[in-house]
Image (cartoon, rainbow, N blue to C red):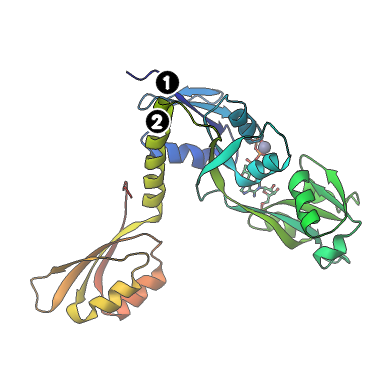
Amino acid sequence: MSTERVRIALQKTGRLAEDSLGLLKNCGLHIDRSRDQLFCRIKELPIDLLLIRDDDIPGFICNGICDLGIVGENVFAEAKASGDREFAATVLERLGFSLCRLALAVPENGNINTVSDLANATIATSYPNLLRDFLKAQNIEAKTLVMTGSVEVAPRLKIADAICDIVASGATLAANNLRELAVVLRSEALLIRPAQQFSGEKEEIVRRLLSRMRGALMAEDSKYIMLNAPRSAVNEITRLLPGCDSPTIMDLNKEDMVAIHAVCKEAVFWETMEKLQSAGASAILVMPIEKMTA
Ligand code: PRT
Ligand code: ZN
């Protein structure tokens, strides 16, 4: 009978929250929580969830309050770059969602055109440690204005010449007449853990969860494809199937026709379907995969 429980820190509300909970649900965990609940006990596995602000997640891993956390790489890397000697969290898995980048941006019609033009400029950011490391690597001396929010308005208010902030679609930069100058860090959601080992029992729970997570992430990206084709087109069609190395080929009750079934580990776009048709495929079916193992 297991006594140890693994505690996972997740963002309570915000851009990471839905996908983080969605991933755990796809791992077979039933999460029922009321809106204000900060703690959630999972029945299926010895796991508890702690729902907090994303900025607190790296610290909760380092000080041992939580065993795993899902956090943006931007937040993780900023905490790591703080140089805090207590920082002892590592990346267990890259999760591939919440894609964004930490970027330098400047006014559209200003006189800063290259990164070296930032010398002596004032740069507003919520990421002073990552910005400092980036500027140091580029050999540039600049001033940093730390802001916790609304960084994009700083140039318009004339309190900064540039910003270093998170960009996803670029719409916020465009709405504020800002232009992206350079990428400081590309970011995605990360599963993080303490650097030190857990007890054997806890490591086993983490191993089981990680294996389910990998399967769930793989299933999300994968599709099951079925089609019919002339036998002579099998090689060409196999080459066109994205992320698939060994399809199943079956005889059809029709001369020289076969059925091809395959798991494609990448998205199947309309363009691919059209190319398959041109290569002779017919009755193409593309289906989602609910669960799979590596
Ligand atoms: O309340 P809490 O502190 O937990 O949340 P938060 O407000 O600090 O963070 P939240 O929920 O906004 O974002 C959580 C994480 O999602 C971030 O740390 C990133 O890893 C990731 N992420 C993905 C983003 C974005 N996309 C994003 N677009 N984080 C922020 N933005 C903001 C950005 O700050 C800017 O204001 O959206 C704006 C830019 O978006 P575009 O699409 O206009 O370019
Ligand atoms: Zn935050």
- Assign a secondary structure to mark 2: helix
Spot occupied by residue 222 in the image (x, y as percentages of width and height): 36, 56
Residue 171: mark? none
Q: Is residue 127 visible?
A: no
Spot occupied by residue 263 in the image (x, y as percentages of width and height): 30, 59
Q: Is residue 138 visible?
A: yes
Label 1, label 2: how far apart the Cα atoms are:
9 Å
Tell me: residue 283, above or below residue 66: below
- Assign a secondary structure to mark 1: loop
Tell me: residue 232, above or below residue 271: below
Residue 208 location, quadrant:
top left
Residue for point 76% across, 54% down: 134
| Relative horizontal placement of residue 294, taking residue 90 as reference (left or right) | left
Quarter holding the N terminus?
Answer: top left
Residue bearing mark 1: 4
Residue bearing mark 2: 205
| Relative horizontal placement of residue 256, taking residue 15 as reference (left or right) | left
Q: Residues within 10 Å of mark 1 (few under 14, many from 20)?
A: few
Callout 1 amino acid: Glu
